[in-house]
Image (cartoon, rainbow, N blue to C red):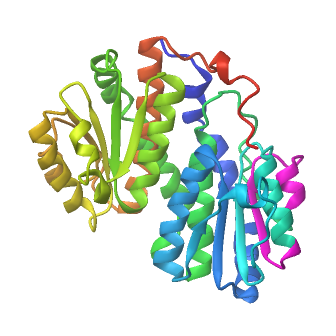
Amino acid sequence: MNETNMLKEIREIDSLRNCCEKNKVVIPEIANEILAFQPHHIMIVARGTSLHAGIYAQYLLELNCHIPVSLANPSVFTVYDEAIDLSHSLVIAISQSGKGYDVSTVLKKANEQGAYTLAITNNPNSIVAEAAKHIIFNEIGETLSGAATKGFTSTLYILTMLTHYLSKKEELYLNTDQYLASIEEGLLYYEEVKPWAHDLTKIGKAVTIARGMGFSIAKEFSLKLMETCLYPVISFPASEFCHGPLACTSEETPAFLFAFDRKTNADIKQVMEYLKDTKAPRYLITNDSELAKEADHAIIINEGNDLYAFFSGVIVMQLLASEMSFVKGTYLDHVPVLKGRTNTF
């Protein structure tokens, strides 16, 4: 039986509820301050799982706030010790542990440039929290698993609600009960991921594919498999996959695809058509039952609101990574080579 902390933390509904409740006032207050600041540009600085949440935010903010959003190159600030004009910028740092030296350095230099700096972190006693002028805490309690799960899920919630208050778009408002119901919906698919996990124990490499906001899930799943199942996995946007990477796939290279956006699902369908030629097994997680017919293996999430289905899909992705690593016997909440080496620099 899978009794890892990773699986336990995926299932921590109470932690996610706490994040929602504790930030009911904080998020709209910060959004109002940002609106008053009137940023011309948004920069997101993060690493690893937090960066994947940042990729989600990049799409969400550009689509709904119509402000250009970039992902920071921290080495510009650390290794090269350069400054960038961020005087009219909102700089969002995402770091669950808050221990990233490079992330805190970007915040400090952004403060010097007059930026509005915001940290999203679960650690109030950290260098990232100290460097930011404004903070939103995840409020999810202690994390014991080496592979981040509830931190990713809660950060996506915070970023969605922040974008809702910045854009004033009601369709981005996450009702707490419905949000938590979408998490519980995802958890219901645990039995469905088990056969996949057993079928996939002998693979040596894989690709993950999505487009738009779903690309954040593909990136995160890639990282989760690499750090827990210990084999190389490369993530691609659907729009780029067929430019060349398609050629490296075969019947020994499973492709994991994610589709929760009806504006981009047609592109996922096209990619699955191309994958037929290479005989790569196609594993799809989606809320589109018609699209699911094109896959070799599919988990169909409740066909409702795309945004809530997206959060259900995040949970299914995490469950699959957890179960695959458990079946392979490669992950028991830490990987020795990573001990003490996960802080960014």
Q: Residue at x 77, y 51 (%)?
A: 102
Q: Is residue 276 above or below residue 124?
A: above
Q: Is residue 170 visible?
A: no
Query: Which image quarter: residue 25?
Result: bottom right
Query: Which image quarter: residue 255?
Result: top left
Which residue is nearer to you in this view: 340 or 264? Answer: 340
Residue 268 x %, y %: 23, 54
Q: Is residue 239 above or below residue 89?
A: above
Q: Residue at x 72, y 22 (%)?
A: 339
Q: Residue at x 33, y 56 (%)?
A: 260
Q: Is residue 258 above or below residue 81?
A: above
Q: Is residue 286 above or below residue 160?
A: above
Task: Tell me the magenta residue range.
Answer: 112-132
Residue 184 x %, y %: 46, 42
Please give left or right for residue 272 compared with residue 129 in the image.
left
Please give left or right for residue 199 compared with residue 289 in the image.
right
Please give left or right for residue 87 compared with residue 255 in the image.
right
